Image: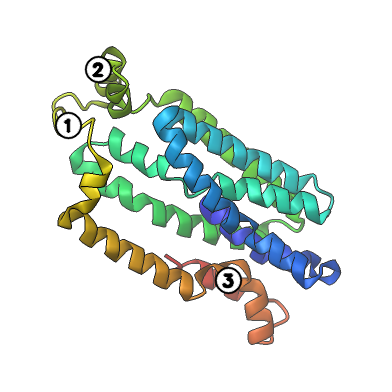
């Protein structure tokens, strides 16, 4: 879902730019990124108060609602920007990565952790392909992405249990035991997680500060490099920079190795 949302403006804006102002184009492209800030803050609070599973369901609903607003906007800029904000609010939430780490065994935790960037790249590539060859109308892209988002979120989150670690922190040990049994974590993961910890104390530790500083530095460099601008305007960049009439093919090439 994340790759679809980040790359959608690249195939959407060229179809309507003839009647959009510079400010409207910027608003459509940047709405998801700005909404991510609110979504990240809400995700941290909601995943602790409501649980990982419910938080993810709320974010998935926001994404589906956003795609519906864009698809039925009939080209009205305000509706499109609001829809893009809803989709941005629902992506890149920490609740997903926390949930994946808490329901997976230590042996598979690294694989699940690396699945996020891979999924983003796959989503970017797919949305560029949709814009280039599969759909001639951007409304069909919204409909397709909305249906896929709704189907995937509804089927997976209904089947999967709540995080056993979160349940243990709430004192629901019986449900946590059932969740561990369903996930097959009784023997592998039991006793390895600390349900309660002081966050400030953890942040003061050298073994926490070093990787945190490295991650923040890498993320800062990525943002300063214009990463989001390239994703949002890939088709326009190829069209204007390379002076191509059909820039969808080169845009697909940009989307394939992004992450």
What kind of element bears circle 1?
Answer: loop
Q: Quadrant of residue 237?
A: bottom right
Depth check: 147 or 51 in front? 51
Q: Distance between the residues labelled 2 and 1?
A: 12 Å
Residue carrying label 2: 177
Q: In which quarter of the image is residue 214?
A: bottom left
What kind of element bears circle 2?
Answer: helix
Residue carrying label 1: 189
Residue at 42 percent of width and 34 percent of height: 47
Left/right of residue 244 with respect to residue 15 in the rendered view: left
Residue carrying label 3: 229
Disc 2 or 1, which lies upstream in sequence?
A: 2
Residue 145 location in percent, x, y? Answer: 63, 46
Disc 1 or 3, which lies upstream in sequence?
A: 1
Left/right of residue 49 with respect to residue 34 in the rendered view: left
Q: In which quarter of the image is residue 24?
A: bottom right
Disc 2 or 3, which lies upstream in sequence?
A: 2
Whether residue 132 is visible here, answered yes or no, is no
Depth check: 173 or 239 in front? 173
Residue 20 location in percent, x, y? Answer: 82, 67
Q: How far apart are marks 2 and 3 (CA)?
A: 46 Å
| Labels 1 and 3 touching (C-beta < 8 A) | no
| Local crowd size for mark 3, using a 10 Å CA cut-off: few (<14), some (14–19), many (≥20) | some
Residue 78 location in percent, x, y? Answer: 79, 53
Residue at 18 percent of width and 23 percent of height: 186
What kind of element bears circle 3?
Answer: helix
Residue at 25 percent of width and 20 percent of height: 181
Q: Distance between the residues labelled 1 and 3?
A: 41 Å
């Amino acid at each position: 879902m994340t790759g679809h949302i980040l790359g959608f403006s690249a195939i959407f804006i060229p179809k309507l730019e003839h009647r959009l102002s510079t400010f409207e184009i910027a608003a459509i492209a940047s709405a998801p990124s700005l909404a991510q800030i609110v979504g990240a803050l809400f995700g941290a609070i909601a995943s602790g108060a409501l649980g990982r599973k419910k938080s993810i369901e709320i974010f998935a609903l926001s994404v589906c609602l956003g795609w519906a607003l864009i698809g039925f906007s009939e080209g009205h800029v305000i509706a499109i920007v609001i829809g893009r904000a809803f989709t941005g609010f629902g992506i890149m939430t920490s609740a997903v990565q926390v949930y994946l780490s808490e329901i997976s065994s230590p042996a598979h935790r690294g694989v699940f952790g690396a699945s996020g960037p891979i999924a983003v790249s796959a989503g970017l590539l797919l949305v560029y392909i949709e814009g280039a060859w599969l759909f001639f109308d951007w409304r069909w892209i919204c409909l397709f992405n909305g249906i896929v988002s709704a189907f995937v979120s509804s089927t997976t989150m209904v089947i999967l249990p709540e995080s056993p670690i979160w349940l243990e922190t709430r004192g629901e040990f019986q449900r946590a035991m059932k969740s561990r049994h369903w996930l097959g974590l009784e023997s592998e993961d039991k006793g390895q997680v600390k349900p309660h910890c002081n966050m400030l104390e953890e942040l003061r530790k050298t073994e926490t500060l070093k990787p945190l500083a490295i991650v923040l530095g890498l993320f800062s460099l990525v943002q300063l490099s214009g990463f989001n601008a390239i994703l949002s305007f890939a088709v326009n960049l190829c069209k204007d920079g390379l002076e191509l009439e059909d820039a969808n093919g080169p845009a697909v090439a940009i989307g394939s190795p992004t992450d």
